[in-house]
Every structure is written in structure tokens, then in C-alpha cells.
Amino acid sequence: IYLDLFNKLEEANKLLSEGKSIVASSDPVYQGDVSKWRRFGNSLYLRLLLRVSGKADVSTQVIAKIKEIADTNKAGYPIMENNTHTAKILWNGTNSSTAVYSSPFMINVRAVDFRTPAITDFFISNLAIWNDPRVNGTYGVNGVNRFGIAPGPAGLIGVPSGYDAGSSVLKQSYFYSDAQTNNPLTLQTDPFTGIIMNVAEVDFILAEAAARGWINGTGEAYYNKGIFDSINYWMPTVYAGVSDANFIKYVVDADIDWNNALPLNTTVRGTQSKLESIHLQKYYALFLVDFQQWFEYRRTGHPFLNPGTGFLNGGRMPSRLNYPLLTQSTNPTNYSNAVASQGADDFSTLVWWQKP
């Protein structure tokens, strides 16, 4: 499948290089800008190449292709470089199932249901510790932060992930819904949640490639740009650029500045490495980008998450989803062939490119 995807992306790059026009009114992503579609296709190419780069049988060819795109043939493979290139669909904010480009957070989702779930401790605690502008009300509207996160009784605090059922865990922070009084910011109606792929992900792909020595440039430069672009997508006026003194102060004060003395990688929980630093920031850059956080976790083992004692499946994070019963019953031959090829139809069966 991946080799076929690579071939299709090569073909797309070639066809889009011809610059044939797209009807702007029929293009909700880039409004007819063919050059941006080409950048998106090649950025997606990098995502898929990196995903399979750890497999010995393809790694040499894959790494060579990453270098070609990022280094030796940049003109032939333009990629995303700033947030004007980010692929997104701007939701229209309505809750009509028949309206074009309605947010999935609005269709058949009651306001009370949107604000009921608590936010996990890992996600919110890091942002709070870093004093990240995305959760700092000072940079928001009327004291509400850009992510529309309501503080709990004890502030910006989440709940443990995978706590035991029946435990007396106090709900703390949650996402504001669109129906709450005097709430100027909520992701439920936010048009910018329709992210397909953003430039920050590309930055962190290049940061990893540079840190591993696959491409020219430094992991530090791409890493810092990734943090900036991740914040800039949601808050385009907070920092002027990577060299902005206020941005540098944020990174240093948050203690997330690049540390070249760290080892390249670590698999020991609670330890740091260059790749763990990259993957942690990438985790936040991939917020609301479909299932990419999960894909990256399976590929890298980062960030170091802390499943609680109530976590099922033997405390192991799911590696895949089961095939639906409908698929098993209506397509039994192909289902059997798939299981024979991939292994048991089980949450713990690794995907072929996954980190063991």
C-alpha cells in the first residue's frame, strides 16, 4: 500500500508542476492555488516516508528520498514552509448536517456533551507549566485562552488518564462549549479546527531527519521553527518569528529550548533525548490533526504517556482497531486474508511499521 501511495504522490507532484488551473470555488482547502496543493502532496510524502523509515528493508531508499525532497532537489519537491501552506478546511460554524463544511464538533453534538469530558492531565499540565500562550488567558479574549479551556477548581489541571472506574477523581479543566454565557472562544465552533496537515508537522519531520543526520541543517533550527509555527497557526500575532525575543524568552522560560548535549534517543520513561523533545512538541502540533498523534506514538513510543491502573488491555496502548463485525460478516474472504497477513485481529497486534 505504501509503495503505491509513494507512486501516486510522485505522479501528483509531476502533474501539479504543470500548473493547470483549479476552479477556486470548487477548492475549499486552497481556493484554487495549485502550488499549495503541490506543497501539500510533497509534505504528505515526507510524513509517509518518515513513518516507514524505521523498517530495515526499506530504510535506505526511504532516507535517500527524504534527503532528495528536503535537500538535493528542493525545487523539484516544494513542501510547506509557513502557515499559509497549511492544509485546512475552514468550518462554517453551523450545526446543520446538510450545510457545507459543518464542523464535526457541531453536527449532532450538544453543547453540554462537548463540555462534559474532562481534559487529561498530561495534555494540559505541560501547557500550563510552560505558560504556553495557547492556554494563557492574557493572550486570549476576555480572559479566555485561545484553546477555549475552562480552568477547574484548582486551575488548569486535568484528570489522570486511565484511572480506575469508580475512583473519586474530581473533574478539573474542560473545553468550553458554544452555548456557555460570555464565552468568546470555543473549539466547538472554531473554523480553524479543520486541520488536514500543518506546516509545524513538516518542521518536526525535518527536525528529526536533521537530528538523525539524514539531511543538512540542524535539528535545533527545525525544532524551534516547529514550535513557532505550531503556536503561530492558532495565534498569528503573538510572536513575529523564531528570532523574536519574546518567542526565545518563552522557549527558555518553559525549559523546552534545544539541548544539544542530550543523546539522540531514549526509551526510558522520564529521561530526555533530542528525539523525545521533538516528538513531545510534535504531539502538541498535531492537536486536532485526525489520528496523527496516535500514529506518531505508535511509530516512536513518544511522548512518554502515563496510562493509569484502570487502563485495560494489560496496560498497553492499542496498536490498531478491530475490523468491524459488519466487515467480517460481509467480506469474509478478504477479512481472512488480511488477518493471515497482518496477524490476529487484536488491539495488540502491531502495525508493520510500528515501533515494537
Image (cartoon, rainbow, N blue to C red):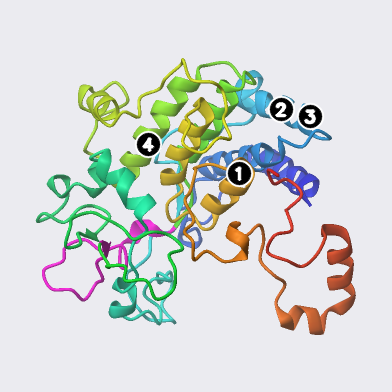
Q: Which residue is mark 2?
A: 63
Which residue position holds label 1? 44
The magenta segment: 173-194
Residue 314 position, x and y percent, is 62, 61
Q: Amino acid at mark 1?
A: Leu
How crowded pointer 4 is (Cα within 10 Å; few <14, some 14-19, many 20+) is rated as many
Q: Label 1: how many residues lie within 10 Å, few (<14), some (14-19) or many (20+)?
A: many
Q: CA distance from mark 4 to mark 2?
A: 25 Å
Find out whether the residues at labels 1 and 4 contact each other: C-beta distance under 8 Å: no
Q: Which residue is mark 4?
A: 229
Q: Does the magenta segment cover residue 184?
A: yes
- Under circle 2, the secondary element is helix
Q: In this rendering, is residue 158 above or below 321?
A: above
Q: Is residue 133 above or below residue 271?
A: below
Q: Describe residue 49's horizontal placement relative to residue 301 as left or right.
A: right
What type is the residue that disc 2 sits on? Ile
Pair 1/2: label in front: 2
1 or 3: mark nearer the eye: 3
Question: In front here: 80 or 149?
Answer: 149
Q: Indicate whether residue 331 is drawn in magenta.
A: no
Residue drawn where x is 78% and y is 27% of the image: 60
Q: Quadrant of the C terminus?
A: top right
Residue contact between numbered discs 2 and 3, judged by CB atoms under 8 Å: yes
Q: Amino acid at mark 4?
A: Asp
Residue bearing mark 3: 61
The secondary structure type at the circle numbered 4 is helix
How far apart marks 4 and 3 lie (CA) works out to: 29 Å
Q: CA distance from mark 1 to mark 2?
A: 15 Å
- Badge 4 or badge 3: first in the primary sequence: 3
**Viewer-proximal residue among 224 and 199:** 224
Q: Is residue 14 left or right of residue 232?
A: right
